[in-house]
Each structure stands twice: as C-alpha cells, then as structure tokens.
C-alpha cells in the first residue's frame, strides 16, 4: 500500500460513537423529504469532487480512471435513488394502519399504526474493490442515512486517502443539509473497527468483503452483550451454465463475454463468474484458451489481495482433478496478474468439491465440462449460497433448462439468463444477496431500494392520540402518502 | 409436569429433517392460493378439535378453559389471517419489476423481476405460556407455512400431549390439502431441538420464551457452519408510565387495570407490565395494595416456572431499595402463586438497575415512584429493549408527555396510550418485537401479517424469458396481482 493509514485512537473513537448516539434521535425526527435533500446534497458534492477523488483512488487502488469515474456516477446515482424513494409514494416508510374494531373476534381490536423508524447508529465496513460504490459513501451508507441512521464508516485500508477525502466531502454536505455532525463519521484501523462493533451505542453493522472477514465480524456482533444484526456480503462463486444450444448458436460470443466478465476489474468482483459449465466436447475450450492467452495482465488492488489470489490459485492448480489450460503471468513486485484458465469435469468437481468450490478472488476461472442435463443439475446442487447464478441457453431449450433454473434459484440471490453476472444494476427490483456464504442475511440485499430495510425497525402505536403520532401515521394525509389501511393501500385520510 | 415426553430419537429426527428438506422445493412451487387453502384447512380442523385440545391443555398447562378456548380462536384466526393475506392484492409476495432501460446511466439496465421465495425449512421452538397461539400451530408455524416453508416444531415440554394431538390434527389437514408429508412435523426433547438447529437442512429458526433460552439457541444458530437467521422473542419488562393527570382523572380505574394486566394468566405473559411508574405521593398505592391483597392465587404453568418466579422474587425482595407492599402466598406443592406487589423509587431503581430491571415471570410487579417529568424520562432511558411501553395520560398533558413517548419508542416495538400491554391484536399493523433483549431481530415481528417476512428470501430474475419466470413475475397479470413496476404500484400487465 502506498499510503499510510492513521488509525483512529480510542479517545477519538469514543467521541465519534458518542456523537453518532447523540445524532440518532435528531436524525430520527427528520422527515423523509429532509433526508432526501441531504442525500442529494451529498451526491452533488461528490459529483463536484469527482475528478479529485478519482485521481486519489486511481493511485491507491490501481483501478483505471474510466472505471472509477463510472463508479462515482454509480455512487451518486445510488444516493439519488434513495432520495427518489424517500420522495416517492410511500416514502419507504411502510406505513400500516388498522383502525379500531370493537367487534373483532375473539377480542376488540385497538387502533394500531405502524411505521419504520431508524434502527440506530450503523457501522459500515467498507470494501476494497469498490473505492466508491461499496465504500465511504456507498450503498450501505446511502441506505442507512435514508433510513435516518447515523453512519460510522470503517475505511478499507486499501484506499485510506480516498476514504478520508470522500468523508470530508460527505461531512461537509451533511452539515450543509443541517443534519447533526454525528450523522456521519469515518474511522480507520482494524482495531478501531472491532472495538466499535462491540460498542453498545451501535445498533447494526454491514460489511462487504471476504468470507473470512465477514464471518469473523458476524461472530463479534452475535457475541456482544446486546447482539445486533450484521449484514455481511461476502464470497460468491457465481456459476454460469451454458447449454449445447447456446454454444452452437453463439459460441464465440460466449467465449468473449466470459473472458470479459471474469477478468473485469482484474477479476476482483464479488460477482465474477468463478466456474463456467460447458457441455463436454463443445469445441469452445480452444477458443477460450486462445482468448485468455492473448489477454493482458492488470494491476491488482493491493499486495494482500495479489498474494491471496496467487495462494488460492496455486492450491487449485495442484488438485489432481484440475488441468491448467492457461496460466497467466503473475508479477508480485509489480502487483499484476494476467488471466488464468483452469479446467475440470463434473465428476472431478464433485469428488473434490471443498477445494474446487473455493472462491479465487482475482482473474482466474474454471471451465467445468458436463456430460448431460442430469450431470449439470447434479453440479448445480453442489453449490452453497451464491450472489448470482447464470444460464446461457436458447429459448427452445426452455423445457430442459427449467429444472436447472429451479436448482439455481434455491442457491442464488439473482438468476441471470444470457447475461454476465458482473455489473449490478441499481434499481427498485435489484437483489444483491443470497444464502450463506454469499451473505449472513439471506432476506436482505445490499444493493437496490430495498437495501434500506436492513436499517429500519418497525414500531406500532396503539390508541395514541392523533396529535402525538408521528406525522405519517396521523388521520389526515395531506401529502397523499401511500399507506396500507385495514389491509388496502390508499392515499386517503383515515377516519377513526 | 404431569405427562411424559417421548423424546425424538436420532433416527426419527433425521427422517423428519430429510422429509422437510425434500418437501421444501415442492412447497416452493405451490401458489399463494394453494397455501391459503391449506392454512384454512388447518384452521378448520383445529376448530373442530378445539374441545378435545382445550381439555388436554387445561390439564397440562393449568390455564383455565375460557382462556384456552379463546386462544384456540386466536390461533385459527391467525391461520386465516395469513390465508387472507395470501389471497390479498399482493399475495404477500412483494413483487418488484424494473423493465429493461437501454438508456440508463451509467450503464443500460437489464429487465429485473423480484419476488419473495420461501427461505427453506424452519425450526420453531414453541412457548410454554401459549399452548396454542405460540405453540405447535401458532404464529410462527402459520407464517412459515404461508411463506411456503416446511415447518419442524420443537414442542414445549410443558404440554407434550397437547402438542402431539395438535400436531396430528395439523398433519392430517396438511395431507388433506395435498401438501407433502414433510411440510409439517413435531419433535420433542431439548437434545433433539438443539441437534435439529445445528442441522444444515434447516434454514431459519424461531423461538418464544426466556432470554436465557433464546440467547443460547441464537448462539447455536450463529455458530453453525452455515449460520441461519434465528428469530427469538424473549423477555420483556413492559414499563407503564402514569401521569399525575391520569391518576387524578381515573386513579381507581388504573389500579384495577394494572392488577388485571399484571396478573392475567398468573402473570405469565411476555407483555406483562413489570413496572408501573406513578407520581410520588399519588395516593394510589394504598388502593393498589388493597386490590392485590384481595386477589386470588392461581396455578402456574409448571414447576420450573413456579420455581423461577419464586427465585427471582426472593432476590428482588431482598434488594435494599425494594419495599414489599404485599407478598402473595406461594404454594410450591400446589404450584400456585398469588400476586405480589413491590415498590421502589426512580433513584433506587437507577442505583440498582441490573437487579430491578430483571424480568420476574409470574404475578409480580413493581411500583416505581417518580418525582417529576425529568425523572420519569431518566427512568425511561434506563430500559433496554422491550416488547411494549405504555403511557397513561390525559390529552391535555400532550406537551409534557411527548418526550417520554419519544424515549419509549426508541426502546419498544409497541407504544400504547391509555391501555394495557397484555393482549396482542393479530392484524396487518401489529408489531410484536423490539430491540434486544425483547428479540434477537429488531426489524421483525412474531405477530401480525408481516411476521411472514422472517421466512421469505427475495430472488431477482434478470432477463429471464417470460415462459421461464414464476407466474407472479410474468408480463401478463390476469389475476390483477399488485406489483411495483418501475417504481409504481400497479395491477396492469407489463410491457417489455
């Protein structure tokens, strides 16, 4: 790493956590519109600072300028999406009202009015591989602020100066929006991060990174005196299955797409396709090898990740069932790696599944040959949770492919058809999650509008007089907020 | 305990878990309407068997016939509520569709279609104090089946025969509805329960009971090779604050209501008001003592709970800051206890908060005198998470009471005005949850329609052809399912 990280000392950390705790009730009182304004303010400020931030991130992460510039756009787009959600028909508040029913059976029903409140101060562990979109002002921060939670970000050590500068921009925008100072803060250092996670003032945690790191922190959160939800988005193998029909119809296009996807960002995506299942004897393997052999080496994020890739790759390459189709050049000093392609078949994979179903974070992928549909199905069943799973097929193969899609949807958060899993659209419907080890919370997503649900907590008010209710729950509904009243969605006033 | 529990042996347990795993994909394929039919079938069957079930439960739990009969009604009402939800406008599927947008920035957006799928086989730990509503066919089972999850219930040892018989009724109704056999099963015994919780075939757990029990099982779930969500609903203190205005306006009525609430079911409710905050010198204490002294002893659920109550009460009574206003008669042999009223003030409570803020499960409550609004606020801040918190006040005290309501809503899942927390209406808006130690999952509820969210897992389908999509996600929407399409709720078809 080129930059020095100034670790947050204990006294500073305590001040940060206290400020977050103090800010929580103030933020909880802001309206959805106020929070939307603050998110737009942050997005605008980041856009203005983009050039400077990208230059810092280029230096620290070795990612190319165009990619980083696009990532800032994605990051500010994400902040604006939550603003839009807060300004939308239901303000992301999930208001549910059941009016009193004195005739209800077996007992009369009181007036019940429920809405989402912020869960409290959130600790965000930033990722290495997205210095913007999954880092200081990334999706976790955006969704937690949208919910009304103060945010403490633990910077990733891979890009400390980018993190510091982003945090300054965010903090200034937060202040300009009139939010309390404790609404947002950055801390640095592993020890500070773990100490913070153990602190009772924090009420939820989130993380993007390795399975080992996420699982460790999940354990810390679960063992606190007061356990808290910990949303870790971790490793993923992202299997891709190609049918004979697809190979025949567009083999070369698939070979290109695969190379592009598994080497994008030098293979350092949580959605990188780690295994490509091809029908045996598809004739595509030679083309894949040629493609991979012609591909350039790229700089990896940092020394630790470079070394991790080499270690896992060395282990994989030595498994008896693995053939090395092309071994990419690796330059430890320069921190670069070129794409590597390995091969096996389903029988060997199933025999050695623990080793072969280990994520190799970097530009390495495994081609797995299968004999027939049943064997492809069997292979699919070998996977634990994954963020994505993909099928490339022709529409006239629908009937054969349906069982495979079923197996895959049991194991993945996102099921793709004729696409590549790298690239995660930010929208209402997106779900970036999945069963363990993809995440520690299979019911939640870290990307998309519903990511806010991780940081909300419902409260119901029983028979509370109108004047004492939070505004979204009152009888009168002048803003036309969309609410579920006695089971039906409506924008009307409520009559008691 | 009067009955012998036959503990589930290892071989039987393995068969049960395998049947649940095998049933999971079959259940996942059922339509919302099919699941609704099954839930109604279970409810009807339980209603038909009510007399027999209530007789068994009376014997095993010592709860009175009228209460148990009402509880069966609540239980079947709950099953029918989820059936209604599944037949409702959105079928509880939370469908979100974003159609492709080739002009989206920074990258074109694919077609994304997301819905809730069942999380997989669920293990339900039944409660002692509600042999029906939080037991074999209770809210956890109803919401998990509604989600499409196979359910394995670990019976509470306090009512094994009631559990067995209820399970027979449920199993038969499940079979008659055409669901696979593994959709529902009962197991008995602590060891079988823990073994099941560690089994990788189970994908979520739920629990209603003590803080110690819930926390232990939460730890087991978190330490599995594959951790799973564990929704424990545990201890709660349910503080009640009474203002001077309320005492003046309706002191006697409050005294009656308080006694009724903290002694309901011999104080064995998770929503029992454990502490009543009264203005100092309210003059209500004498009346409370008279009421309590006149109250009858009642039979407690079982020996363990009877003993637990006596132990905690003994410890409380010996705290230097506690005065015993009335000590109810306790008959260990007969298993009965009469109501006990303790007293302290806020200063003493704050000095000895760990002891005084310990749940005493049974017919005991503490009256706490406060000097002024500020002191009441300070006391409110001493509480950790609670299922409920209540204020009794006059509407013209709104301004003074607002800060107290704010403190309470930070700590409780349900905030009541001029009511008593025992009695939990089952409806759309209900939220029976709260920050730890009320639950291990503050974003979720174990009662009410949204309890289903604990057992659902979203999956998004990207660019999948219409014919291969689950029906609720297809372009055509002949049933008028309410879906969020490009951000707006609609029942229209989707145009690609």
Image (spheres, coloured by chain):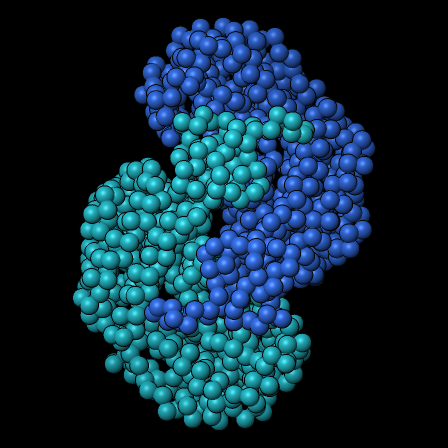
Chain colours: A blue, B cyan
Q: Is residue A58 above or below residue B164?
A: above
- Residue A266's spot in the image, x, y percent? 62, 22
The residue closer to the viewer here, B46 or B492, is B492
Q: Is residue B307 above or below residue A211?
A: below
Q: Is residue A162 above or below residue A491?
A: above
Q: Is residue A106 visible from the viewing direction of this image? A: yes
Q: How many marks?
A: 0
The residue closer to the viewer here, A401 or A84, is A84
On the picture, is A185 further left or further right than A294?
A: right
Q: Is residue A11 visible from the viewing direction of this image? A: no
Residue at 42%, 31% in the rendered image: B469
Screen quadrant of the N terminus of chain B: bottom left
- Residue B106's spot in the image, x, y percent? 68, 29
- Residue B401's spot in the image, x, y percent? 63, 76
Residue at 60%, 75% in the rendered image: B379
Write down the quadrant of residue A206 in the picture. Answer: top right
- Residue B406's spot in the image, x, y percent? 62, 68
On the picture, is A52 further left or further right than A242?
A: right
Residue at 27%, 57% in the rendered image: B43
Residue at 52%, 31% in the rendered image: B495
Q: Is residue A356 above or below residue B40?
A: above
């Amino acid at each position: 790493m080129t930059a020095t990280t100034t670790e947050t000392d204990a006294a500073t950390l305590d001040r940060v956590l206290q400020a977050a705790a103090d800010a929580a009730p103030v933020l909880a009182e802001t309206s959805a519109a106020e929070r939307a304004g603050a998110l737009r303010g942050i997005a605008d400020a980041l856009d203005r600072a983009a050039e400077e931030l990208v230059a810092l991130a280029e230096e620290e992460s070795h990612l190319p300028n165009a990619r980083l510039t696009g990532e800032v756009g994605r990051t500010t787009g994400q902040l604006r999406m939550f603003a839009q959600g807060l300004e939308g028909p239901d303000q992301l508040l999930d208001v549910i009202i059941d009016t009193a029913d004195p005739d209800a059976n077996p007992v009369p029903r009181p007036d019940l009015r429920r809405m989402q409140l912020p869960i409290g101060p959130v600790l965000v562990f930033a990722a290495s591989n997205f210095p913007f979109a999954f880092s200081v002002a990334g999706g976790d921060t955006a969704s937690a602020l949208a919910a009304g939670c103060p945010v403490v970000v633990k910077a990733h050590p891979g890009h400390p100066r980018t993190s510091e500068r982003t945090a300054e921009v965010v903090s200034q925008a937060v202040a300009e929006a009139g939010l309390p100072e404790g609404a947002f803060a950055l801390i640095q250092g592993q020890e500070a991060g773990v100490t913070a996670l153990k602190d009772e003032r924090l009420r939820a945690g989130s993380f993007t990174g390795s399975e080992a790191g996420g699982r460790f922190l999940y354990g810390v959160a679960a063992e606190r005196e007061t356990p808290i939800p910990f949303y870790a988005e971790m490793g993923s193998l992202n299997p891709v299955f190609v049918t004979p029909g697809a190979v025949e119809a567009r083999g070369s296009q698939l070979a290109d797409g695969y190379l592009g996807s598994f080497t994008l960002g030098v293979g350092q995506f949580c959605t990188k396709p780690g295994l490509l299942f091809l029908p045996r004897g598809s004739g595509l393997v030679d083309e894949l090898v040629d493609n991979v052999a012609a591909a350039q080496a790229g700089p990896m994020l940092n020394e630790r990740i470079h070394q991790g890739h080499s270690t896992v790759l060395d282990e994989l390459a030595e498994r008896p069932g693995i053939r090395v189709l092309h071994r990419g050049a690796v330059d430890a000093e320069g921190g670069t790696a070129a794409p590597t392609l390995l091969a096996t078949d389903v029988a060997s994979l199933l025999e050695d599944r623990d080793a072969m179903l280990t994520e190799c974070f970097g530009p390495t992928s495994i081609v797995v040959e299968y004999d027939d549909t049943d064997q492809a199905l069997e292979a699919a069943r070998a996977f634990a949770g994954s963020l994505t799973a993909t099928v490339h097929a022709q529409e006239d193969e629908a009937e054969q492919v349906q069982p495979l899609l079923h197996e895959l949807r049991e194991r993945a958060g996102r099921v793709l058809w004729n696409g590549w899993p790298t690239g995660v659209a930010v929208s209402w419907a997106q779900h970036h999650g999945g069963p363990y080890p993809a995440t520690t919370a299979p019911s939640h997503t870290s990307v998309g509008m519903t990511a806010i649900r991780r940081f909300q907590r419902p409260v119901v008010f029983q028979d509370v007089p109108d004047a004492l209710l939070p505004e979204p729950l009152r009888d009168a509904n002048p803003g036309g907020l969309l609410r579920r009243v006695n089971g039906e969605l409506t924008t009307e006033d409520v009559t008691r």
